[in-house]
């Protein structure tokens, strides 16, 4: 019983740094000397805000469809075939997990802008940048690896006997797929679609930078309402609408995840078919090759564009941008410089890792190993932060922590707390995934051999869960490093992070400096990427 | 050597209700909990181990109440159905685990691990990892790991059910041998009645969360107290007949039942002897290695007889239409 007291730590943390801010937003948006709906009405009757709400949902739907179109063929290829270079393509697909969206947005500007690489190649401006098209493509970039991962994993688990029986009964070709295979894949397709949809629904950096002034999401709308117009009432009303919708989506997602988990439990594991040399040089090989090349171009080209741009100064190869980034004279960041920004990013990143991993580990352990009263409610309460957004959180923090007893605005650790709340649901997922795989009777075996609870945990469960914990920690680090919205709302000049600095350079239209700084971000992310590869834990 | 006792145990898990009035394994005894799946035998074992807390009642080791003592304080060794070998540790590390927790010196640990490996017949495999072992080998490692800490009580939860028949038979002999050698109080869970008969000093038959009968293997085999026990332990003949003046007549058979009205008479197929005669009609037969199983009908009541071939009063090739029957022992249920 005493060990369960440790649960009070994550619970207290969530109450203060998630639920209190959310309640303050609800209060702000629905209260004016009494309950009022006038701010909600003001938002809903305004055609600008209404348009944004529809656009947010519409672009999320369209992005999800594009993501599926890109991801499903990959899921098929990965589930069915073994081919040379498969592990390399797989590794490339991990990249979006750790790449900051601001850098990807910059890459898109460099590729599709007026002077952009693709624009030059084709000879005319495709009108992709600063429109809904750029938003959709960037969202697909981020999410199609999720579809490939979830659907192919399910595909491999479809018992071949089902298809064989269907074939013996006369089904074949597309009929076989439609009647037998597809229904069995649906949980995977649905769950990964919901995840993509939620990501796009709450997307911030990408529409902010790539959408131009005409295309904004609710998230961007809240941000401008508060930071530019200083209208907290309207901002809160928008946040309430967003929260309500995203909780509904979250609920559907979690339900679909249950279905997915059930389907994935199938013990059958089909080995991918090794392609013969003949097949490789045939049609199958060609299609796999084309897909691999598309993946490669899609994921790598924005990164290469950033790298290339950072090294070209006035048409010549030079390190001038890097010199400028580190010198004081060209610095649009006030009260800080690039070195301080790097230091801040690392400080926030590591602190968020420590905090979110601790919180997530305790929660995951409680969810998978302990029985206690009110566990269902507990589970729902710890999952809710996944449905909140960075900007909403930032708004809540501004409202909650600007006065005693919790006057925390302006401190560096309030930023860490925000990053922790944003990152920990993902850490929780990574750790839950490995804990689920560790059989509970391993711990019981240790207990029967004389280990105390904590010894059994340290000696048996922790080493087995380590891979998942590391992957979770890296997610947290990557998210903290890349976080823009909440940090922007909460930071003081001396707490500028690399991501904020890149955004500053972007706003000042200093592409070269932005690229040079992004390359630094890219190096940090690349280290994360390599650690994930080394750990070898299947985040796949 | 300790005795293990359960008193007035009650455990409710959802719809399932486990209720054990009293059950005792004596010092050094091999007691088997036998029953179909879902009867509560594994739960009973987990209560003894301390993984489950009973809602009511007491678990006693040598008369000491163990309810509040956690599993690691009970000095038990446990073998799980799927072995639960730590996948990140070698065979040596797995077996040494309990000894390391007891802070034994290095040399002592090594000595004991090697000794136990020899006992279970796994010398030379100490550096392998669990995934590199066959099912039978994994089972031996699990047994070694449980035994090396010299527990006072050994708990085995269907330890052989994941193995194929031949290995199962060999290993159950070895488990019995090791248990006798160490004379360790053992509680064994299985749903396989043959295994239970072969290995146990006593068997407790369980059904729907209660104990139906406890006794020595032959005792519960030949003198079951309930129809469930009778049927669960093997082929059985149960005749439901009407008794008059304390007797039941069937063909030329006469059973002394000592009461009147409806009675159930139970006997095993091997208690049925075949004689010359004609009141039992042969309605079918089945040849087994060296034996024959006959289906006989006496006045519409079907019974099964099982005999060695050389005991028959006729040759298989010219089997008569009907025979005489003698039933040497029977019980009233």
Image (cartoon, grey):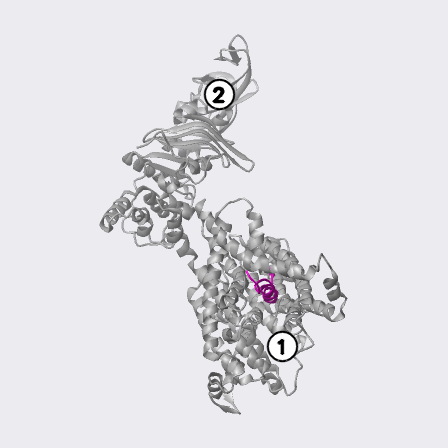
**Magenta stretch: helix, strand or loop mostly:** helix
According to the picture, the residue beneath numbered tag 2 turns out to be B266
Q: Secondary structure at mark 1?
A: helix
- Residue A147 within the segment the image draws in magenta: no
Q: Which mark is residue B317?
A: none
Disc 2 to disc 1, C-alpha distance = 86 Å
Q: Position of residue B137 (x, y in %)?
A: 35, 47
Q: Quadrant of residue B88?
A: bottom left
Q: Which mark is residue A210?
A: 1
- Tell me if residue A187 comes above or below residue A142 in the rendering: above
The one of A3 and A201 positioned closer to us in this rendering: A3
Q: Are marks 2 and 1 in contact (CB under 8 Å)?
A: no
Q: Position of residue A362 (x, y in %)?
A: 47, 54
Point out the stretch of residues depicted in magenta: A387-404
- Residue A400 within the segment the image draws in magenta: yes
Q: Secondary structure at mark 2?
A: strand
The numbered mark 2 sits on a residue in which chain? B
Q: Is residue B227 left or right of residue B84?
A: right
Q: Position of residue B105 (x, y in %)?
A: 24, 49
Q: Is residue A328 visible?
A: yes
Q: Position of residue A5 (x, y in %)?
A: 47, 48
The one of A382 and A294 positioned closer to us in this rendering: A382
Instruction: Give the class, few, some or many, for how many residues have Cα within 10 Å of label 2's Cα (few <14, many ≥20).
Output: many
Q: Quadrant of the N terminus of chain B?
A: top left
Q: Residue furthest top?
A: B245
Q: Residue furthest front?
A: A404
């Amino acid at each position: 019983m005493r060990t369960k007291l440790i649960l009070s730590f994550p619970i207290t943390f969530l109450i203060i740094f998630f639920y209190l801010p959310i309640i303050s937003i609800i209060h702000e948006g629905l209260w004016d000397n009494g309950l009022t709906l006038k701010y909600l009405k003001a938002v809903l009757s305004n055609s600008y805000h209404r348009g944004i709400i529809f656009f947010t949902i519409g672009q999320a739907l369209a992005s999800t469809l594009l993501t599926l179109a890109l991801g499903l063929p990959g899921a098929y290829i990965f589930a069915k075939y073994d081919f040379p270079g498969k592990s390399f393509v797989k590794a490339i697909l991990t990249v979006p997990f750790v790449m900051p969206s601001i850098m990807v947005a910059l890459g898109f500007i460099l590729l599709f802008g007026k002077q952009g690489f693709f624009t030059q190649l084709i000879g005319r401006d495709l009108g992709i940048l600063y429109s809904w098209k750029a938003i959709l493509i960037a969202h697909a970039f981020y999410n199609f690896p999720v579809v490939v991962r979830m659907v192919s994993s399910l595909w491999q688990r479809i018992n071949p006997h089902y298809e064989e029986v269907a074939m013996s009964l006369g089904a074949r070709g597309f009929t076989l797929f439609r009647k037998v295979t597809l229904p069995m894949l649906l949980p995977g397709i649905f769950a990964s679609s919901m995840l993509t949809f939620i990501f796009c629904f709450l997307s911030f950096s990408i529409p902010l930078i790539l959408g131009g002034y005409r295309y904004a999401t609710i998230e961007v709308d809240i941000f401008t309402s508060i930071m530019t117009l200083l209208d907290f009432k309207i901002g809160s009303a928008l946040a309430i609408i967003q929260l309500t919708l995203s909780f509904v989506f979250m609920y559907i997602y979690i339900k679909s995840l249950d279905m997915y988990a059930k389907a994935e439990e199938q013990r059958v594991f089909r080995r991918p078919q090794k392609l013969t040399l003949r097949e490789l040089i045939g049609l199958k090989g060609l299609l796999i090759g084309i897909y691999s090349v598309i993946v490669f171009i899609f994921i790598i080209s924005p990164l290469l564009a950033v790298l290339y741009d950072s090294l070209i100064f006035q048409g010549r190869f030079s390190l001038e941008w890097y010199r400028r980034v580190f010198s004081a004279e060209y610095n649009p960041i006030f009260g800080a410089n690039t070195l301080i920004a790097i230091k801040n990013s690392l400080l926030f990143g590591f602190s968020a890792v420590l905090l979110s991993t601790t919180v997530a580990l305790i929660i995951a352990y409680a969810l998978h190993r302990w029985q206690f009263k009110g566990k269902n409610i507990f589970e729902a309460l710890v999952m809710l932060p996944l449905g909140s957004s960075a900007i909403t959180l930032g708004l809540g923090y501004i409202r909650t922590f600007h006065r005693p007893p919790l006057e925390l605005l302006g401190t560096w650790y309030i930023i860490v707390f925000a990053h922790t709340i944003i990152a920990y649901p993902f850490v929780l997922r990574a750790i839950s995934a490995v804990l689920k795989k560790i059989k509970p009777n391993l711990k019981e075996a240790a207990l029967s051999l004389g280990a105390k609870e904590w010894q059994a945990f340290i000696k048996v469960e922790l080493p087995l869960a380590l891979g998942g914990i590391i992957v979770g920690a890296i997610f947290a680090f990557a998210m903290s490093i890349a976080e823009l919205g909440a940090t922007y709302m909460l930071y003081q000049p001396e707490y500028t992070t690399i991501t904020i600095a890149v955004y500053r350079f972007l706003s000042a239209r200093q592409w070269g400096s932005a690229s040079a700084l992004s390359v630094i971000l890219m190096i940090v992310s690349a280290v994360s990427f390599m650690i994930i590869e080394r750990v070898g834990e299947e985040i796949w | 050597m300790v005795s293990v006792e359960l008193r007035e145990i009650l455990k409710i898990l959802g719809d399932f209700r486990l209720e054990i009035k009293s059950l005792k394994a004596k010092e050094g005894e091999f007691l088997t909990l036998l029953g179909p799946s879902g009867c509560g035998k594994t739960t009973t074992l987990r209560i003894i181990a301390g993984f489950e807390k009973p809602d009511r009642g007491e678990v006693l080791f040598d008369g000491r109440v163990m309810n509040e003592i956690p599993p690691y304080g009970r000095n038990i060794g446990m073998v799980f159905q799927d072995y639960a070998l730590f996948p990140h540790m070698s065979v040596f590390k797995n077996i040494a685990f309990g000894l390391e927790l007891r802070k034994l010196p290095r040399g002592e640990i090594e000595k004991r691990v090697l000794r136990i490996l020899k006992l279970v017949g796994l010398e030379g495999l100490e550096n392998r990892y669990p995934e590199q072992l066959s099912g039978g080998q994994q089972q031996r490692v699990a047994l070694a790991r449980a035994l090396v800490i010299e527990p006072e009580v050994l708990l085995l939860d269907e330890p052989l059910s994941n193995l194929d028949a031949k290995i199962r038979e060999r290993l159950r002999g070895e488990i019995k041998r090791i248990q006798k050698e160490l004379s360790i109080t053992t509680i064994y869970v299985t749903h396989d009645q043959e295994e239970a008969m072969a290995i146990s000093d006593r068997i407790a038959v369980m059904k729907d969360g209660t104990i139906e009968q406890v006794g020595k293997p032959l005792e519960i085999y030949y003198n079951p107290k309930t129809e469930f026990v009778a049927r669960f332990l093997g082929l059985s003949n149960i005749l439901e007949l009407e008794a008059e003046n304390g007797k039941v007549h069937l063909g030329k058979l006469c059973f002394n039942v000592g009461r009147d009205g409806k009675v159930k008479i139970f006997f095993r197929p091997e208690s049925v002897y075949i004689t010359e005669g004609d009141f039992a009609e042969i309605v079918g037969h089945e040849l087994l290695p060296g034996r024959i199983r006959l289906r006989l009908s006496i006045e519409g009541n079907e019974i099964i007889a099982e005999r060695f071939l050389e005991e028959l009063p006729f040759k298989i090739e010219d089997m008569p239409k009907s025979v005489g029957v003698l039933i040497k022992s029977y019980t009233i249920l």
